[in-house]
Amino acid sequence: MEFLDEISFPVGTAMKANFKGYGKDLDETFLNEPATFYRILLQLYSGDEASARAFLHLLAATLSEKAGVFIDPVEFAHVVESGDRERLVSIISMYLEKLQAQR
């Protein structure tokens, strides 16, 4: 699945290459290991939590815009940072359902 690259191009493309450097797949890590995704994201931003969270806030805004539903950026960042896979999958599923309905 090329999920993040698709919704956050071209940033997703750069992130994908960076995650490979850590031996991780960008999308699989995001969806299956969100806390690990956040830790790697934090490393990519040299430990700057504000920048890592800003990336997640922008990702939530992109999801909201593309699906036409509001995804709270602060909650979204917290979900990823805390590793709440169940909630993350719920948010992403809602996003995908809304996209399918728009087609």
Image: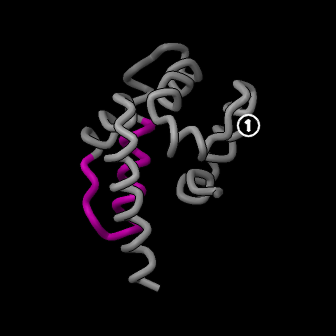
Residue 33 in the image: state x and y as whole percent: 50, 35
Residue 63 sits inside the magenta stretch = yes
The residue drawn where x is 32% and y is 43% is: 76
Q: Which residue is mark 1?
A: 17
Q: Residues within 10 Å of mark 1 (few under 14, many from 20)?
A: some
Residue 15 sits inside the magenta stretch = no
Residue 78 in the image: state x and y as whole percent: 30, 33
Q: Main secondary structure of the magenta part?
A: helix
Residue at the far bottom: name it.
Answer: 103
SS at badge 1: helix
Segment colored magenta:
55-72
The residue drawn where x is 25% and y is 60% is: 70
Quarter assignment of residue 15: top right
Viewer-side residue, 51 vs 32: 32
Q: Is residue 61 above or below residue 56?
A: below
Name the kind of residue labelled 1 in the image. Answer: Ala
Q: Is residue 87 above or below residue 33?
A: below
Q: Is residue 51 left or right of residue 86?
A: right
